[in-house]
Amino acid sequence: MTDTSAAVGVAHGGERLHVPIPLRWGDLDAFNHVNNTAMLKLLEEARVRVFWRPAPGEDAPPTAVLESGLHAGVLTLIARQEIEYYAPVPYGRHPLDVQLWFSRLGGSSIEVCYDVCSPRASATDVDPQTVYARAVTTVVKVDAETGRPLRLSDEERAAWSPYLGASPSFTYRR
């Protein structure tokens, strides 16, 4: 069984969440590496694990403060995503280490940053990891009934602020 809880590390001026995300065989394409469209699903899975409150008996990081589901009256909508790929992600049985932090907490939006890395042998592993991709997603918190943006709460800001850091720079950005 794979541990799916998030660990915490420090980088980019703030802490990072380390979210283990297992690969599925269906994530591969004809070239035997993770397809670029599957990468969006991997980022989504990491994001859900760090934002949404866990069900009873589940583990979650301290950033998991949003209620999930339409009954909660809150949606998180993707306004923008940017991904830069550095190396093909090979299929492996060990989960990828998706490192996640926030570069901006706006009025109703959050800029989520990711490094998608090779698996870590352990939490104390000091060997360099391969960074397969780097990404940034702008998420907007929205009222499910009206579709209007909702301001981030004090609880959300308090939970997410320790993980504030610099936005990644992209090599090929114009």
Image (spheres, rainbow, N blue to C red):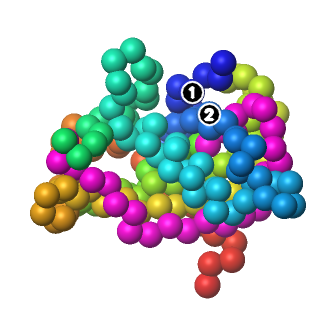
Asked whether disc 2 touches disc 1, contact meaning CB atoms under 8 Å apart, the reply is yes
> Of callouts 2 and 1, which one flags the residue occurring earlier in the amino acid sequence?
1
Judging depth in this view, the residue of 72 and 15 nearest the camera is 72
Tell me the residue that label 1 is attached to. Answer: 4
Assess disc 1: are there few (<14), some (14-19) or many (≥20) residues with their C-alpha within 10 Å of its C-alpha. Answer: some
- Report the number of discs: 2
Residue 80 percent across, percent down from the top left = 44, 69
Residue 142 percent across, percent down from the top left = 22, 58
Above or below, 119 against 149 in this view is above
Residue 101 percent across, percent down from the top left = 49, 47
Quick check: can you spot residue 11? no
Judging depth in this view, the residue of 93 and 99 nearest the camera is 93
Labelled disc at residue 20: 2
Give me the residue at 38% from left, 41% from top. 51
Give me the residue at 34% from left, 60% from top. 77
Question: Is residue 40 shown in magenta?
Answer: no
Residue 14 percent across, percent down from the top left = 48, 42
| Dot 1: element | loop
Q: Which amino acid does label 1 sit on?
A: Thr
Left or right, 93 with reference to 154: right
Q: Which amino acid does label 2 sit on?
A: Pro
